[in-house]
Amino acid sequence: MMRSAVKFESEAGRGRRESVAFLPKVERPDKSHSQARLLLMVVIVLIVILLASVIGFLVWYFAFKHQRVISPSSTPALPDHTKLVYSGYLTLSNLPYSAELENVESTAFRELSGALQQLLKATYLGIPELAMFFNHSAVTAFSEGSTVAYCWIRFLIPNVNSSALSLFTESQITGSLRGTTRSSGLENIRITSVSLSPADPRTVKEPSDKSCAFSYYADPSGKKIILSSPGFPSGYPPNAHCQYLLRAERGSVISLAFTTFNIRDNCQEDFVTVFNSLSSDRGNIITEQCGNRPPTNPLAVFSSGNVALIAFITSSISHPGFQVEFSQIPKLTGCDQILTSDSGNFTSPYYPSFYPPNIDCKWTIQVPSHFKIRLQFSMFRLKEPGMNHDICNKDYVEIANVKYCGEHSFLGLTSSGSTLEVKFHSDLSFTDKGFLAEYSAYNPQNPCPEQFACDNGLCISISLTCDGWNDCGDLSDERNCVCNSDQFRCNNNNLCKPRLWLCDHSNDCGDNSDEKQCGCNSDQWKCKNGTCIPCTKHCDGHPDCVDFSDETGCANVTVGVCTDFTYQCKNGACTSQVNPECDQKKDCEDGSDEESCDCGVRPYKHNRIVGGTDADVGEWPWQVSLHFGREGHTCGASIISERWLVSAAHCFQRTKEANYADAGSWNTYSGLRSQRDMQNVQVRGVKSITTHPHYDHNTFDYDIALLELLEPLVFSNIIHPICLPARTHVFPSGMSCWVTGWGRLSENGQLALVLQKAEVKIINDTVCNIVTRGQVTPRMLCSGYLTGGIDACQGDSGGPLACSQSGGPWFLCGIVSWGEGCARKNNPGVYSRVTELRKWVKIQTGL
């Protein structure tokens, strides 16, 4: 007998019908058979349950898992989606501010943030163009000033709908929230202003997300509170998204002075961002930094109000992190000044710390009526990432209706009368070091007694005029000149330049007119050494110029036959790629061109330091000072490994006065900046000195020596090796390099106490041979300026000539060897050419 079956059907999602059927019951005469059937059904049910569990897990994993994890703010968007986050604040009226709102656990915070969050959600779901992309919103904090609510809104746009990105404008995002807004529970609240701008999705957090989230109040007395990154100084955790909410009393601003800052030098993946707000919107960024800052260039910033936010984002690579002193100071109520002294100086607010955002200052300089004003900026840095500094529509200094911004190594001008106004403006985002300005009154009848008066107010020696070199900075010393027999005239600007600069492969005129008509026909390509080859030979993968210049900078790379001008990989194959070593590209199939590349980097991050010749701490970490006996600094050297230094052979010769070849009489000082400050300096004795067997003390040919240390160096932020170039490495003429040392500050002058640096240019071999009257050999190169003024001097012998291309690692191009006098005109410095001596270094050291 069979009972009727019962069947239940329901409509499931996505249009598929699901059914559950209860099978008819069948009477069975045999109990043992019934038990067997019952056991079989139990097994079947268990299998069905197991399969259902597996299927359910797979459905959850592939269909719902990502939708579950995108709610926390720190997770990335789906692979096929673009995540857009807008962050900022809403100013609410008709709502008294309560301190309870500063506690995310309080009832007041939860009620108001929840109501506002629903309002945000309803607003964007009510905009047809945006509703389908709305994902989540959060209210994260409140502050006083009426009542300010900080929030963020997230949208997910499928990549197939990438055209929808054009809908997301700040006016669209903010416009829908402006004006009177009422909602259930918010009847008496009016949103009077809205500020929302794009934000990095990694920098926003849910209020409930307590991971790496901190909140601090400044000490009312101004006492500094020490904050640090997680794990400092042992190392911060990987993939962390940290926030530090900072508050101070009303009428105060927040001061942040980073005493240690050592973050991975990759601002795309590891960075610290300081916001002038409790929201992480880009429109309120004060600064965004990464890298390892030296103690001489600390990061110090100020907010414009009594709140600030620090966001700290890390990747998988750990560094020590940061430590910062957090305090409050009274808000700057005014920075306008009237300056009536005959001379003086003034700076941007809080200089040399970063100036605050959203500030305007004016300095009015007044001198006696029969005088004029000379104004010079010895430091000027008002930069913002991605901004066109020719327009100056963000932060600027305005003088005589002209705006100045960006970075200037020197900025000088003169007034038209006895009064001069200098205005300074900073907007809401991105601040910088600012400026240091000096002014003085001068008699316009005699502005520079016994000197040349530049148009910008600078006074220079008359001997520096009409020499082809821009000494004034505005070229006024090179205008209206009569070219002498040793000079030629440029086409575009009529400037006189030394005739030796013709056809030297360097664009000295600015319009390349000094490099035209240099011997090659229109269908020929000119090598760096002046040789002409057919244009078809240029970038054909085979070096036709003896200096390999026809293949320099070419996009095509070939691997095959080895020549004297190709880089040889470890596996014996060769690549025609110019300078492939340590360029972060795999040019050799075996990757050997990227091996042993922990060199030529400066652990401390250095801004381009403008003005002056004193080196910064750790700026040239391979520089070594060599002391002989009690004579103090005698020569320089370069670190090439933990145990090896390279210097000049002429430093280690036996003389009547002393045996400079005696290794036991030498000490090496690594990490040294000042000869009077031995802090963090590593002193090592010398085990052996090996000079090149072909060194000629008459000609200085083969002027190279290797020093083996008694104990290995310990590399640090201020001690690091420089890269040795391959034999085929090309240092083109005209390339800017740097020479460093403690040599004499002038010919026959005193030795420098602080490490000096000078930017010099590689001079082509033809000109080098002419100005040295044929004294250079293939193991030598010239660098400097034919106009003189900048050079290596006595005491710099053995030191490095360091070169870097396109922000890559620094290579040891040359070793300071010899020269006539110091910084004389047409007498550049002569250096040992390391590429020609590379094989000998390899044999001696294995490096």
Image: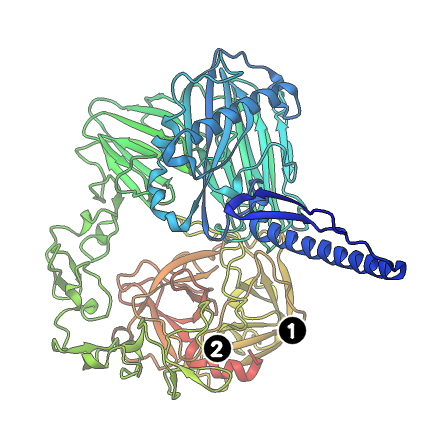
Please give the name of the residue rendered at 72% of the width and 53% of the height, measured from the top-left corner: 49
Q: Secondary structure at mark 1?
A: helix
Residue 685 visible, this orientation: yes
Please give the name of the residue rendered at 67% of the width and 69% of the height, measured from the top-left corner: 711
Three-letter amino acid code at disc 1? Gly
Find residue 704 and name its label: 2
Residue 304 visible, this orientation: no
Q: With respect to residue 62, does 521 lie above or below?
A: below
Q: Is residue 420 left or right of residue 50?
A: left
Residue 100 in picture, x, y percent from top left: 63, 18
Which sits in the foreground, 740 or 621?
621
Find residue 664 and name its label: 1
Mark 1, Cα crowd under 10 Å, few <14 / some 14-19 / many 20+, is some
Which sits in the foreground, 762 or 121?
121
Q: With respect to residue 292, does 545 lie above or below?
A: below
Mark 2, Cα crowd under 10 Å, few <14 / some 14-19 / many 20+, is many
